[in-house]
Amino acid sequence: MKKAIGSLLLFIILAAGAWAQQGAEALVLECAGYLGAFFKNRFDVRVAVVSLENRSELGDLAMQKLYQMLLSRLETEKSIRLVDLLVDFSDGTGKFNLSRAHDLDFLLDLRLIQNKSKAGLGLTVFSRLQDRVVAVKYFEQAISKGEMDLLQAKHFAFAAMGFSKLLEFESKEDLMDIQSIAGDDGQTQYYFYYPDEIIVYTAREASLEKHSQFKLKWARPYHPVLHPEGRLLLLRSARELMLTAGGNFSPYAQVLTLRDGQWQEAGRVDFVPLRFVTLNQNPYLVGARFEEGRNFFKDRIYFLPFRTPADSEGLQYRRICPAMAIDIASANGLLQAIHVIDRDYAYRLFSADFEETTPLPEKKGASLAALNGEWLAMSDHSRTADQLFFYDIRDGGLRPVYSGKIAGEVLFIAAGTWQDARGFWAGVRQQADGMVRLLVQFWGKRDE
């Protein structure tokens, strides 16, 4: 290989700063944007990083994250055909499969160093065909402590490379939520919630097998919606299996009880239940109301003492903010926190006492779901190249632990299980050549 391979220099230091569009993310975005513009008038350019060196205080894991962040951005550039040659990164140095370098058009090298108070990104692009450096560029940013924590975070929630997409299949349109619960025979049943029906599945090896289905009938007023959104809640009360189903197309949620193998209407509540929690040793349905016919919730969280579904006596509420997505984090039936994405797509966190904190300022999102007060999954704010971010929320905060790329737009996230794995369901809309399809994915780890 020629001595001038080319270099992409990342100079990163620790400094105060905000998360969104700053720090490492901003450096990567600027670098990827520059490369996208540089290769814009070319077609099918084969590009790869061939060398990676770390001279900073960042660890090996953080370097891998920066590398993957850059690759994920470059993969969205239509003119670039990116090749990932990284085999391993350890002791501050990347190891690459250079046997494929002869197939490339341009070679890149990454080197990370630390200065006193600034973060800099220098870029040099080497053309293998021309055998010379063809571009040099330098960027500069700062990295906040919160972002450093993100970059340095180990995959303690799931072992490295162990958290992955375990299941994917195509579903019919307008799927809004997925919940699961053990049936009377002990086998897990998976409830797929559509506006006009619920389809129940059971697991059969690596796929789902239809078990039953039942229709949902909504009385007037009925709000026409462009995109139906709703939430399903499954619970057991007095050894009876019950469910609540609500959405943005109806001012009330249905409450159904399974009796003699048939789902029967047991009442209505005038908000969408999200969780079943215990407060002061009393059970409550906790939820929110959609703005009529719209895709966002109003600015209140409702608490209904759970006696009978038709009994609304004692309904209370606490104010939050209008929200595109809400979920209630609870552990052992106890309220822990309220996770919110507001109408500006900003992530916001409210404690059990409804005191607001923002662990990642200006973090954007679109959908989210909490798993037993332990993990939180959040989608990116993107319609074509989405991402899933996973966080540890056991201490009441938000500590990033993993991320995964999504081809398409995440419409909803639901915490749940798939066979023996805990994790998150995701409904993903993909559009190509005028066709739209809905994929169902489950992200989790079997040996947690």
Image (cartoon, rainbow, N blue to C red):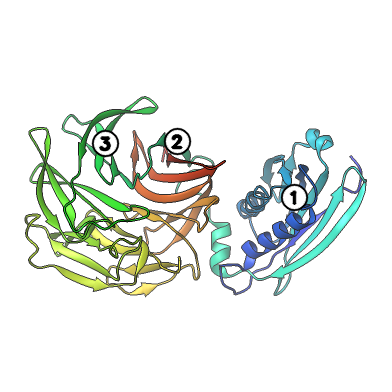
* SS at badge 2: strand
Circle 1: is it few (<14), some (14-19), or many (20+) Cα within 10 Å? many
| Residue at image coords 75%, 36% | 97
Circle 2: is it few (<14), some (14-19), or many (20+) Cα within 10 Å? some
Mark 2 or 3: in front is 3
Circle 3: is it few (<14), some (14-19), or many (20+) Cα within 10 Å? some
Q: Tell me, yes or no, whether the two marked residues, 3 and 1, touch with CB atoms within 8 Å.
A: no
The N terminus lies in quadrant: top right
* SS at badge 3: strand
- The answer to whether residue 357 is visible is yes
Identity of the amino acid at label 1?
Leu
* Drawn side of residue 136 relative to residue 269, left or right: right
* Drawn side of residue 289 relative to residue 391, left or right: left
Q: Nearer the viewer, residue 14 or 224?
A: 224
Q: Position of residue 21 (x, y in %)?
A: 60, 67
Identity of the amino acid at label 3?
Ile
Alpha carbon separation for disc pair 1 and 2:
31 Å
Q: Where is residue 8 in the image (x, y as percent from the top left)?
A: 78, 56
Q: For mark 1, what is the residue?
A: 52
Alpha carbon separation for disc pair 3 and 1:
50 Å
Q: For mark 3, what is the residue?
A: 199
Mark before the other along the chain sequence, 3 or 1: 1
Q: For mark 2, what is the residue?
A: 166
* SS at badge 1: strand
Identity of the amino acid at label 2?
Leu
Q: Where is residue 222 in the image (x, y as percent from the top left)?
A: 22, 56
